[in-house]
Image (cartoon, grey):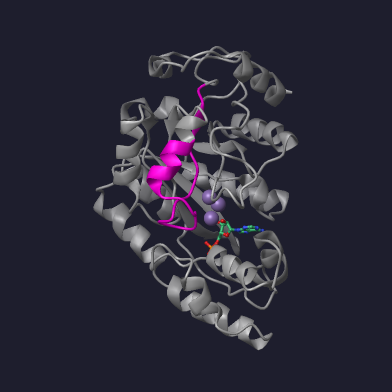
């Protein structure tokens, strides 16, 4: 319901919202100016597993009406300067961003960092260490695929890689589609790249404590990305949110391309239960693969505190 109401508002809205609204305090139980800001704080470029450059993403975001943007490449901030410059050139406000891979309770969890100082040495080193090992993992994935008759997957995936430090499952998926093994990337994940499948290699990423610590000590805000995507029991999910808070985490993605309308409502309640601010982001990767485009999600429910309220001083 919140989504439909927000979409209706979006349709009626005229010119761009002014950023001074970020400084206003939200009223409870209504769609506030802060909440109807068209913020898109989650997407990927060729610096990780997206297919567009930071500049092309900035253009697409602007065309779609995004007012506050963040590029959040996986375990990598090499695209931040380009993204910030492109946002500035297009009159969009910008927050620094990344999406850190974490291992929690045996599962991979993603923690988005927003508004951090991109020159922070501890954060940079932490991200470097997290990226490290991707190449070796990719080689093992390729070996696993070779065992079921798919040869040359490592070299094939590399053709799709924009950043040699950031070879991901997505690049393998694109290669398997190109070589006709599957029709689309979602099928590749289902048949080859998820737990128990031939190309899946268990991997240990950063700890939750480290990822949240790196972000917050660099003056950023840590955000639990797309919580509905994890296969946790209710107890494990409770532990994730509790430990995340204890380590200094402050926000959760409520409205994301990975959530259904029902999940917006569910995680809006979780945000309130845990006293977390809320974020909004498409998780856009590619015009050919992503079903949610930049800046096209429903607005945040008005009952929630938008994450950008915590980051007013960090907006560029
Ligand atoms: P990696 O960090 O190498 O494990 O790759 C994770 C990335 O794979 C995610 O960020 C998504 O972009 C993509 N991905 C994961 N699961 C799926 C899926 N079921 N369908 C399509 N893409 C997926
Ligand atoms: Mn990705
Ligand atoms: Mn993710
Ligand atoms: Mn993502």
Is residue 68 positioned above or below 148 on the image? above
Q: Which residue is drawn at 48% across and 14% down?
A: 15
Q: Residue at x 64, y 82 (%)?
A: 150
- Image quarter (top left, top right, bottom left or bottom right) of the C terminus: top left
- Image quarter (top left, top right, bottom left or bottom right) of the N terminus: top right
Give coordinates of residue 86: x percent, y percent: 33, 38
Q: Which residue is drawn at 39% across and 63% down?
A: 163
Whether 53 is among the magenta residues is yes
Residue 2 visible in the picture: yes
Q: Which residue is drawn at 71% across and 38% down?
A: 263
* Extent of the magenta region: 37-60
Give coordinates of residue 24: x percent, y percent: 43, 13
Q: Which of 81 and 315 is in front in this view?
A: 81
Residue 104: image quadrant is bottom right
In the figure, is residue 307 to the left or right of 5? left
Is residue 119 positioned above or below 157 on the image? above
């Amino acid at each position: 319901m919140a989504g439909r109401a927000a979409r209706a508002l979006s349709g009626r809205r005229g010119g761009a919202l002014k950023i001074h609204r970020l400084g206003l305090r939200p009223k409870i139980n209504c769609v506030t100016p802060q909440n109807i800001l068209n913020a898109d704080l989650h997407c990927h470029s060729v610096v990780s597993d997206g297919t567009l450059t930071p500049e092309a993403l900035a253009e697409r975001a602007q065309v779609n009406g995004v007012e506050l943007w963040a590029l959040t490449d996986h375990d990598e901030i090499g695209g931040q300067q380009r993204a910030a410059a492109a946002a500035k050139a297009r009159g969009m406000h910008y927050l620094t961003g990344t999406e850190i891979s974490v291992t929690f309770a045996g599962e991979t969890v993603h923690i988005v960092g927003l508004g951090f100082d991109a020159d922070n040495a501890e954060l940079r080193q932490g991200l470097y260490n997290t990226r490290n090992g991707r190449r070796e993992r990719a080689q093992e994935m390729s070996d696993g695929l070779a065992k079921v008759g798919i040869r040359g997957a490592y070299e094939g995936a590399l053709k799709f890689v924009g950043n040699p430090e950031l070879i991901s499952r997505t690049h393998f998926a694109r290669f398997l589609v190109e070589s006709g093994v599957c029709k689309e990337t979602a099928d590749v994940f289902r048949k080859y790249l998820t737990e128990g499948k031939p190309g899946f290699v268990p991997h240990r990423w950063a700890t939750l404590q480290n990822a949240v610590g790196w972000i917050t000590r660099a003056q950023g805000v840590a955000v639990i990305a797309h919580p509905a995507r994890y296969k946790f029991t209710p107890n494990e999910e409770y532990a994730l949110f509790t430990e995340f808070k204890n380590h200094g985490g402050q926000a959760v993605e409520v409205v994301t391309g990975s959530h259904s309308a029902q999940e917006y409502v569910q995680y809006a309640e979780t945000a309130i239960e845990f006293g977390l601010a809320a974020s909004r982001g498409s998780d856009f990767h590619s015009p050919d693969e992503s079903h949610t485009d930049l800046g096209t999600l429903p607005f945040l429910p008005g009952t929630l505190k938008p994450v950008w309220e915590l980051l007013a001083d960090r907006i560029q």
